[in-house]
Image: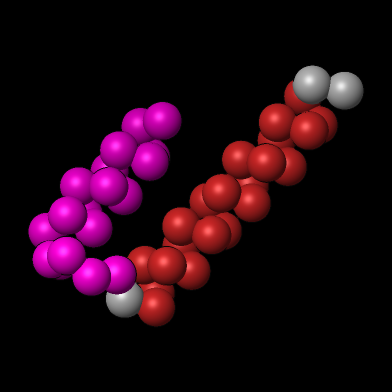
Amino acid sequence: MVGASFMLFKFLKTGRTLSKKEACLLIIYWLLFVIVEFTVNR
């Protein structure tokens, strides 16, 4: 959650649009979250 908060604050400083790099980071972060949730909740 702390990492997501830092990413959010960084993205808020760049304006109202996401760059491709920011979008890719969000997708990777989401995929890691989903993988961890599936492995922990088995």
Residue 40, horizontal then vertical, whole percent: 77, 24
The quarter of the rendered structure image containing the N terminus is top left
| Residue lying at 38% horizontally and 41% vertically, measured from the top left | 4
Outermost bottom residue: 20
Question: Of residues 5 and 18, which is closer to you in this image?
Answer: 18
Which residues lie in the magenta part?
1-18
The relative height of residue 23 versus residue 26 in the rendered view (above or below) is: below
The quarter of the rendered structure image containing the C terminus is top right
Asked if residue 8 lies in the magenta stretch, the reply is: yes
Dominant SS of magenta comes to helix
Outermost right residue: 42
**Is residue 36 found left or right of 12 in the rendered image?**
right
| Residue lying at 31% horizontally and 50% vertically, measured from the top left | 7
Residue 27, horizontal then vertical, whole percent: 53, 60
| Quarter occupied by residue 11 | bottom left
Residue 3, horizontal then vertical, whole percent: 38, 40
Question: Of residues 18 and 40, which is closer to you in this image?
Answer: 18
**Is residue 3 found left or right of 33 in the rendered image?**
left
**Is residue 40 found left or right of 7 in the rendered image?**
right
| Quarter occupied by residue 16 | bottom left
Outermost top residue: 41
